[in-house]
Image (tube, rainbow, N blue to C red):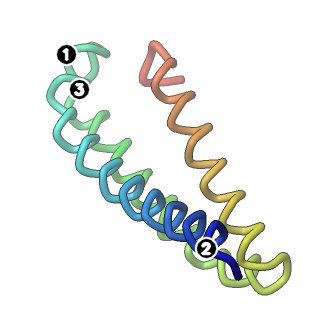
Amino acid sequence: MNKSQKRNILFLMTAMFFLGSSATDIYISSLPEMVRAFHASATTVNLTLSLYSLGIAFAVLFVGEFSGKFGRRATLLYGVATFSIASLLIAVIPIIYG
């Protein structure tokens, strides 16, 4: 493994760590503004956080199997791509009941 490959792996692992932790932190701090922006109840907005946590917990059950079948790299890249696309879609959807 050359120096360029090591640098790419380090960058990917660092990005994954910060994406996951910052997504939750940013989301939690924006909950009051989301209630105002979407004209929704606090319960509904809090439900989105519960669904996010449930989705993460559910995905953990299958990532090991996918990693064993398709390889770690493919599973990791698919996960990062899915996270990025979902984040983009969430950012542009104008209503909470999408």
Residue labelled with disc 3 = 41
Which of the 4 image quadrants contains residue 47? top left
Which of the 4 image quadrants contains residue 66? bottom right
Residue labelled with disc 2 = 3
Near-viewer residue (51 or 87): 87
Q: Residue at x 84, y 76 (%)?
A: 70
Label located before the other in sequence (3 or 1): 1
CA gap between label 1 and label 2 equals 49 Å
Near-viewer residue (26 or 72): 72
Q: Amino acid at mark 2?
A: Lys
Quadrant (top left, top right, bottom left, bottom right) of the N terminus: bottom right
Q: Residue at x 18, y 23 (%)?
A: 33
Any mark on residue 36, and which? 1
Depicted 90 relative to depicted 38: above or below: below
**Farthest right residue?**
69
Depicted 81 relative to depicted 68: above or below: above
Element class at badge 3: loop
Label located before the other in sequence (1 or 2): 2
Element class at badge 1: helix
Depicted 44 relative to depicted 93: above or below: below
Q: Residue at x 59, y 74 (%)?
A: 6
Quadrant (top left, top right, bottom left, bottom right) of the C terminus: top right
Residue 85, how many percent across, how many down?
62, 37
